[in-house]
Image: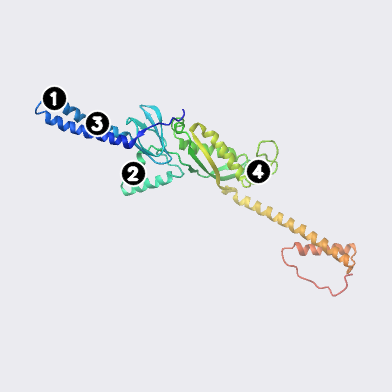
Amino acid sequence: MKEKELKAKSGMGMLFFWSLVYLAAIAVTVFGGILMDRSYLGIPVFVIGMLWVCAGWLPLLGLKVLKPQEALVLTLFGRYVGTLKGAGFYWVNPFCTAVNPAARTALRQSGDVEQKKDASAAVSSGSVNVQSAVDRRISLKMLTLNNNKQKINDCLGNPIEIGIAVIWRVADTAKAVFNVDNYKEFLSIQCDAALRNIVRLYPYDVAQNVDTTGDGEPDEGSLRGSSEIVAERIRGEIQSRVNEAGLEIVEARITYLAYAPEIAAVMLQRQQASAVIDARKMIVDGAVGMVEMALSKLNEGGMVTLDEERKAAMVSNLLVVLCGNKDAQPVLNSGSLY
């Protein structure tokens, strides 16, 4: 089913027209009551006027007010007649019914959070928020869905916790209302499923011999280092799942990423060990270069002539001094080197 935009009449003009008709019915009723004492013709005139006075408010039910970026999906006796769009004051068939199965669904998303707070405040104060209880308008604005964090195993089997924020909007109101039972809950479930499918293809950090693109070649893709690519793949996966619901996924972003608590401490020790190894490697490379430079300078100046044994001892001492964690204590030799 595709969306069909409904062309409605001006609400202000119809309000003025039906108001005049209602006033005319009151006048006919009064005239019929006066005429009843003089002629039998007054009885049908009075009855017709009273019937219209009692039922004359029904056409006013067709008055609809829409704000910018709002829509109403209307059905007439179960048949879809069209979608009313555009800000303004409209009049439609008073027997048309607005349909929005997700009107009372509150997710962790923009708009629903505020409505839920307002409803809670109204209940606590003893008042009833009638508008939020019967509002069937569909928002066409961009909404942000912030699902709960999920625990998922990455491609290496490590459990991680990840959360995403999805920016979405309703692109086809007819599909959103009639193709799925509740488009908000449908979107939330599909976001969880798409997130799980994409995350299991990536390691948390860069790992060897891991193919994340599906081309058969190892790459350096990871959840931590390739967040933009991962987010785009998640967006595409969600979009492919919600096309039938008439929803458009504008953007998806990773909002939370961490190892699960049961392995977080171990992974932290692993990262610390890797950092220590990298630092030691850098220190050793620098120390070897400094020792080589020192020996070269001594040989060029001819200040000291060292045999291979003394060079080895000097290299050992310099490496100990340069690679040690603590400052070396100098020892003065007052005798001969030999």
- Residue corresponding to mark 2: 129
Q: Which of the numbered marks, if any, corresponds to residue 221?
A: 4
| Residue farthest to the top, as pictured | 40
Residue 330 image offset from top left, x and y in percent: 78, 71
Nearest to the observer: residue 252 or residue 209:
252
Left or right of 28, for residue 80: right
Q: Residue at x 57, y 49 (%)?
A: 261
- State the image quarter where residue 27 is shown: top left
Residue flagged by tag 1: what amino acid is it? Leu
Left or right of 256, for residue 155: right
* Kind of element beneath mark 1: loop
Q: Looking at the image, is mark 1 or mark 4 earlier in the sequence?
A: 1
| Residue farthest to the bottom, as pictured | 334
- Mark 3 and mark 2: Cα distance apart in space: 27 Å
Nearest to the observer: residue 181 or residue 18:
18
Residue flagged by tag 3: what amino acid is it? Ala
* Kind of element beneath mark 4: loop
Residue 225 image offset from top left, x and y in percent: 63, 47
- Mark 1 and mark 2: Cα distance apart in space: 49 Å
* Kind of element beneath mark 3: helix
- Residue corresponding to mark 1: 41
Residue flagged by tag 4: what amino acid is it? Gly
- Mark 1 and mark 4: Cα distance apart in space: 90 Å
Q: Are marks 2 and 4 in contact (CB under 8 Å)?
A: no
Q: Looking at the image, is mark 1 or mark 3 earlier in the sequence?
A: 1
